[in-house]
């Protein structure tokens, strides 16, 4: 069976350890943070970078960096842009192809629309300055001033983008459910796909974060569980992945911390879902 599903791999010691784990688990691509669980940025060590790049270039095409959660581009008073540039620089050094970002929150803005305008400004600048990495915005589970829980926020954002074709999108199934899109219900699922269709151009939908959650519908709580083991459930997730709009998009899972053997079993099971 061809392995089609990518994995979020936590950085705990070296970059080489991350990429060797990806090889052992036979994933076609992976995602990571450049931050240790302690909250500190990774330190680049020459031999580690060299070995990472050697394996990276031999076995992988696309690699996804998940931007840190403290990057909030919606508020120009926070030095988020500088942090973003720092992470992009690291990503380029390690030849990551994509950077997944949460859109942020319009805290301190007069309203959500102003936050979206600030976000667009930052994205316009980044598109102009950085050509070697693709930015992917992910829908979130959060509400109130947060951008991107409501999928319609992306539509508003696009009105302010100078290079809308360059900004890509990721749909996280658990975030969608926690925000209030009932993906466990077939009819609601169809409505959600219709909304995606009307909002995000097909060529800009770049990634599916296939996650499930034990949190309630509309709870706005971002807590993942293994796909099929939560409130969305196996049957509904399999159905979701079969929509024409979804079926050819790269899929990556972000399970809670489980041991490597369990990760292997989960990946094997999920690859069967889409085989
Ligand atoms: Zn996600």
Image (cartoon, helix red, strand yellow):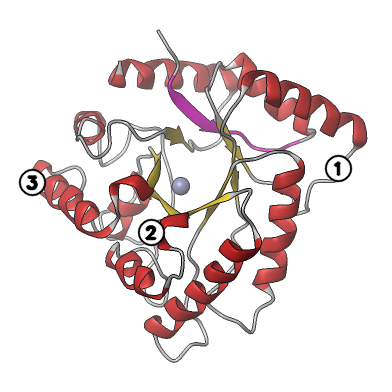
Residue 36 visible here: no
Q: How many marks?
A: 3
Residue 117 visible here: yes
At 42% from the left and 12% from the top, the residue drawn is 2
At 13% from the left and 44% from the top, the residue drawn is 185
Label 2 vs label 1, nearer the camera: 1
Q: Label 1 crowding class (10 Å Cα cut-off): few <14, some 14-19, many 20+?
A: few
- Residue 187, numbered circle: 3
Q: Which numbered disc, 2 or 1, marks the residue that appears first in the sequence?
A: 1
Q: Which numbered disc, 1 or 3, marks the residue that appears first in the sequence?
A: 1
Is the C-beta of the residue carrying label 1 under 8 Å from the nearest atom of ligand 1? no
Please report contact status of discs 1 and 3: CB closer than 8 Å, yes or no: no
Which portion, as a residue range, is magenta?
A: 4-12
Q: Report the Cα–Cα distance between label 3 and label 2.
A: 21 Å
Query: For residue 25, which quarter of the picture?
Result: top right
At 19% from the left and 29% from the top, the residue drawn is 235
Please name the residue that numbered disc 2 is placed on.
141
Name the secondary structure under disc 2: loop
Q: Residue 32: x, y in percent?
A: 62, 40
Above or below: residue 115 compared with residue 246:
below
For the C terminus, which image quadrant?
Answer: top left
Q: Residue 243: x, y in percent?
A: 19, 35
Please name the residue that numbered disc 1 is placed on.
44
Left or right: residue 20 versus residue 48 is: left
Name the secondary structure under disc 3: helix
Q: Label 2 crowding class (10 Å Cα cut-off): few <14, some 14-19, many 20+?
A: many
Q: Which numbered disc, 3 or 2, marks the residue that appears first in the sequence?
A: 2
Q: Residue 128: x, y in percent?
A: 60, 65
Label 1 vs label 3, nearer the camera: 1
Q: Report the Cα–Cα distance between label 2 and label 1.
A: 32 Å
């Amino acid at each position: 069976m061809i392995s089609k599903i990518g994995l979020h791999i936590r950085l705990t010691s070296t970059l080489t350890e991350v990429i060797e784990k990806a090889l052992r688990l036979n994933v076609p691509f992976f995602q990571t943070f450049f931050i240790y669980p302690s909250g500190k940025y990774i330190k680049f060590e020459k031999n580690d970078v060299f070995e990472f790049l050697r394996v990276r270039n031999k076995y992988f095409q696309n690699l996804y960096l998940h931007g840190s959660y403290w990057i909030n581009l919606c508020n120009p008073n926070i030095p988020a842009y500088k942090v973003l540039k720092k992470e992009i620089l690291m990503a380029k050094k390690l030849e990551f192809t994509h950077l997944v970002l949460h859109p942020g929150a319009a805290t301190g803005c007069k309203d959500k629309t102003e936050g979206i305008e600030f976000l667009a400004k930052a994205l316009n600048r980044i598109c102009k300055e950085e050509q070697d990495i693709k930015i992917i915005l992910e829908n979130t589970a959060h509400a109130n001033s947060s951008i991107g829980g409501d999928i319609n926020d992306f539509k508003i954002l696009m009105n302010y983008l100078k290079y809308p074709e360059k900004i890509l999108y990721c749909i996280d199934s658990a975030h969608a459910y926690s925000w209030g899109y009932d993906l466990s219900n077939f009819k609601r699922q169809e409505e959600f796909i219709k909304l995606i269709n009307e909002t995000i151009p097909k060529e800009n939908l770049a990634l599916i974060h296939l996650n499930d959650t034990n949190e309630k519908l509309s709870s706005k709580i971002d807590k993942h569980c293994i796909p099929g083991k939560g409130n969305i459930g196996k049957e509904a997730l399999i159905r979701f992945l079969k929509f024409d709009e979804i079926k050819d998009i790269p899929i990556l899972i972000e399970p809670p911390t489980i041991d490597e053997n369990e990760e292997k079993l989960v990946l094997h099971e999920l690859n069967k879902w889409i085989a």
